[in-house]
Image (spheres, rainbow, N blue to C red):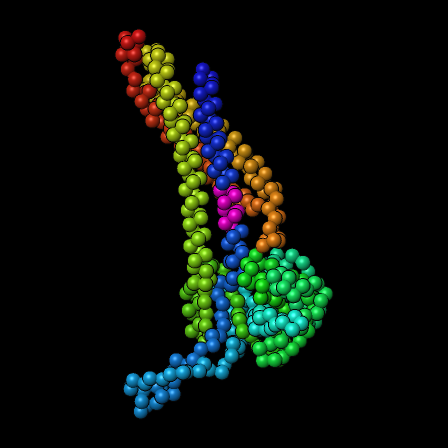
């Protein structure tokens, strides 16, 4: 209370550091989660598919007479297997019984031409299992207009990518003629619009039920081109992708391989966020140290009198440590409260962009662990900031101080 102004300034330093730490961590991690969700929420942990490629073992290389020779073969044509996954329904059933697998969603991808008058727009129709697609990938959050259940309830229906719909000037309820690469034609009714925030996707992609897409291609109910797998543990994806590829005889790609560049960008953003936040707390700690250090020099006379009247060095040290902890606790708690208020303010600021139609305000992460880290760091830094000058004060010789005066 004798140096109340200095104590308030020290507590204000802690408050500012904790407030900015909570606000910055909540906003930056919320923003990172939103950016990650644009890609990762729509990406399976493992994707099984059939790659169109030439056979690695040509007949001449399998021949006993020529297998040990150097055989130069040119202009090899791919096998006529198409993109169908052989025995796809059995693979889906086997994956669903695997305890490591969280969920499975089958898919049929059909390259098509959208017929707009005399113009053909190249794109693709994704035949999806609507129920599983919603459960695993939150499909409805990317459909700002329309109801995804209409894909099952309305026959020959389609949800168009927003960019594609703008090109075609299509509205909900319109009929869109579609032609496959092999000439099959079908008229599909528009029941909604899809918007992922990625223009390259929204300009060519549409979604229909898996049955509608199989019918469009003239295939049976067992025809599948992709099997999307989500795991309980994302880190198992690279190893399980190799296991499933060998077990089921398909190509397999894991999410880490498919999004390696994006994952690197996320790590860099997180490093920058944590670095800036920790620097704020450290700077606040140095401010407290300087204030307490100056306070001790100003109170040399009082310390000398205390020690001359019987107070021990430990008593003097405890006085200044208690002072620093009071500053840390009061400033830290106030910082937590102000940080939470600032997070709420940011969370209510409008953030509207045509690329992200489902997001209306800035994203904020209210994770409790950041509040816990903030208050612990405040107590640790203020304790250390008080302990060093308090240790110096406990060693003061009262005789020298009083004689000097």
Specify the farthest residue to the right: 173
Asked if the stretch drawn in magenta spans residue 158, the answer is: no
Residue 334 x %, y %: 52, 30
Residue 29 vertical placement versus 387 (above, below):
below
In the picture as drawn, the residue positioned furthest to the bottom comes out as 65
Q: Position of residue 342 (x, y in %)?
A: 56, 37
Q: In which image quadrant can residue 108 be found? A: bottom right
Q: Position of residue 254 (x, y in %)?
A: 45, 64
Residue 401 visible within the image? yes
- The structure residue drawn at horizontal position 57% and vertical position 40%, both measured from the top left corner, is 346
Residues rendered magenta in the picture: 25-33
> Please, is residue 236 above or below residue 62 in the view?
above
Between 197 and 326, the one lying in front of the other is: 197
Quarter assignment of residue 298: top left
Coordinates of residue 11 in the picture (x, y in percent): 47, 26
Position of 294 with respect to 176 (left or right) is left
Identify which residue, 112 or 375, lies in the foreground. Answer: 112
Tell me the residue at 55%/44% (across/down).
364
Residue 26 in magenta stretch: yes
The answer to whether 9 is drawn above or below residue 135 in the figure is: above
Q: Work out whether residue 192 or residue 199 is closer to the camera in this orientation and state it.
A: 199
Q: Quadrant of residue 73?
A: bottom left
Q: In the image, what residue occupies the spot 58% across and 62% down?
A: 202
Residue shown at the point (71%, 67%) measured from the top left: 174
Left or right of 303: which side holds 196?
Answer: right
Looking at the image, residue 397 lies above or below residue 269: above
Q: Quadrant of the C terminus?
A: top left
* Dominant secondary structure of the residues highlighted in magenta in the image: helix
């Amino acid at each position: 209370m004798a140096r109340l102004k200095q104590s308030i300034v020290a507590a204000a330093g802690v408050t500012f550091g904790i407030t900015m730490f909570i606000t910055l961590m909540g906003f930056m991690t919320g923003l990172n989660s939103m950016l990650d969700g644009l890609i990762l929420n729509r990406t399976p942990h493992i994707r099984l598919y059939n790659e169109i490629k030439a056979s690695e073992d040509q007949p001449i290389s399998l021949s006993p007479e020529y297998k040990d020779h150097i055989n130069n073969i040119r202009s090899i044509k791919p096998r006529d297997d198409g993109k169908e996954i052989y025995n796809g329904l059995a693979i889906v059933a086997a994956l669903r019984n695997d305890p490591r697998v969280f969920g499975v969603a089958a898919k049929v991808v059909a390259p098509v031409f959208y017929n707009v008058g005399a113009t053909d727009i190249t794109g693709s129709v994704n035949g999806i299992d609507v129920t599983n697609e919603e459960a695993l990938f939150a499909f409805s959050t990317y459909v700002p207009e329309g109801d995804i259940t209409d894909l099952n309830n309305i026959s020959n229906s389609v949800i168009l990518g927003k960019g594609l719909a703008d090109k075609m000037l299509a509205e909900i309820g319109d009929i869109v003629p579609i032609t496959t690469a092999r000439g099959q034609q079908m008229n599909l009714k528009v029941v909604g619009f899809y918007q992922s925030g990625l223009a390259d996707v929204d300009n060519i992609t549409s979604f229909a039920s898996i049955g509608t897409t199989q019918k469009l291609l003239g295939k049976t109910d067992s025809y599948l081109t992709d099997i999307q797998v989500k795991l309980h543990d994302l880190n198992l994806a690279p190893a399980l992708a190799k296991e499933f590829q060998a077990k089921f005889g398909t190509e397999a790609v894991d999410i880490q391989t498919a999004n390696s560049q994006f994952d690197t960008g996320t790590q860099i953003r997180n490093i920058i966020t944590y670095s800036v936040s920790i620097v704020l707390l450290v700077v606040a700690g140095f401010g407290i140290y300087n204030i307490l250090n100056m306070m001790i020099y100003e109170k040399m006379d009082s310390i000398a009198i205390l020690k001359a009247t019987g107070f021990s060095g430990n008593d003097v040290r405890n006085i200044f440590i208690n002072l620093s902890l009071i500053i840390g606790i009061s400033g830290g708690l106030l910082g937590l409260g102000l940080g939470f208020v600032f997070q709420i303010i940011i969370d209510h600021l409008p953030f509207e962009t045509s690329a992200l139609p489902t997001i209306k305000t800035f994203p904020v992460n209210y994770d409790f662990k950041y509040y816990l880290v903030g208050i612990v760091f405040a107590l640790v830094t203020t304790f250390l900031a008080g302990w060093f000058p308090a240790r110096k004060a406990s060693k003061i010789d009262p005789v020298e101080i009083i004689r000097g005066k």
